[in-house]
Amino acid sequence: MKTTESIVKNVFFISALTSALITISIFCFMVILGLPIFREGLFLDMLTQPWLPQKSIYGIFPMILGTLFISFLSVFIAFPICMGCAALISVIHPGRFSRFLKGLISLMTGIPTVIYGFIGIFLLVPFIREIFEKGSGMCILSAAILLAVLISPTMILFFSSTFENIPESYLKAIDALGGTKVQKLLYVILPNSLHGIITGFTLSLGRAIGDTMIALMVAGNAIAVPTSVIDSSRTLTAHIALLIAADFNSMEFKTLFLCGMILYLLTLACTVLVKTLSAGKRNA
């Protein structure tokens, strides 16, 4: 028995170590191929300058802003909707309808991203264009709304699981006091689910930052600093996809690895935040 447990522990340890080494290796790969940027002292300039290839200026500042605007707007659009759906499923209306709704949401997680992109092009983009009567409709708002739909199933399922893990004694206590389902949600479930809510929000933000297809198909891919939500924009992931066929020896191609490093660091920041919150909860 002990031998079996030891083998299982070693397998898990080797798997975790391999995953960590692969992740570190990928980051090192991007750093090594992006070394010309550091050697020529262009790192900070590229982070703050515009993209003007005709003037040999390869700044990725517009793409960084586009990524942050679209991803943060998408999670802020999705958050209240997901909270409401999770509350309906787990607290307000548990039962057969909630099980059906939860199964439907689970099914949505398997829909390919490109399908959302096609729906956005043929339905959402014309709708946004007609409402604002300005631009092509391929803009930050269109991409954020569609991305909110993409990340909503994951956020809903995470919130719902968090609500359902509240200690039964807490729920029975408020039932004994004659509390309604809404009071149970507001005064017991939400305060005790704060850590899970923040974690789900952060993980969804990381998912939004790393998406490629929706931004590539719907955001418009304009390489300019956006000034409003109806402006077209380009994200870091879309920029990598569009320039991947550039000359390998050109500085334009080298910027792809800088984009990769920035994406890596943004995702790492989300992961570290989640781990920090988890550690804080365990120590509390």
Image: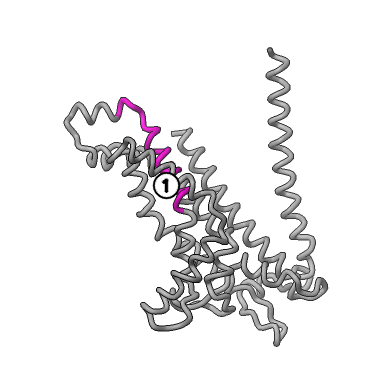
Magenta run includes residue 157: yes
Point out the residue furthest to the left here: 178
Q: Is residue 165 magenta?
A: yes
Is residue 195 something that shows in the picture? no
Look at the picture and state if 31 lies above or below 60.
Answer: above
Q: Is residue 43 visible?
A: yes
Give the camera-side residue of 84 and 20. 84
Residue lying furthest bottom in this view?
A: 55
Q: Is residue 52 above or below residue 32?
A: below
Query: Which residue shows up at 48% across the image and 80% down it?
Result: 136
Image-quadrant location for residue 57 = bottom right
User: Looking at the picture, which amino acid does disc 1 mark?
Assistant: Ile
Q: Which residue is mark 1?
A: 156
Of 49 and 156, nearer the camera is: 156
**Residue at (48, 43) in percent of width and height:** 277
Residue 74 quadrant: bottom left
Q: Residues within 10 Å of mark 1 (few under 14, many from 20)?
A: many
Q: Position of residue 274 (x, y in %)?
A: 52, 45
- What's drawn in magenta, residue-wise? 152-170
Residue 9 percent coordinates (x, y): 69, 25
Query: Residue 161's x, y, as percent?
Result: 42, 38
- Identify whether 3 is placed above or below 273: above
Q: Please identify the quadrant where the N terminus is shown.
A: top right
Is 275 left or right of 137, judged from the image as shown? right
Looking at the image, residue 58 lies above or below residue 196: below
Q: Residue at x 59, y 78 (%)?
A: 223
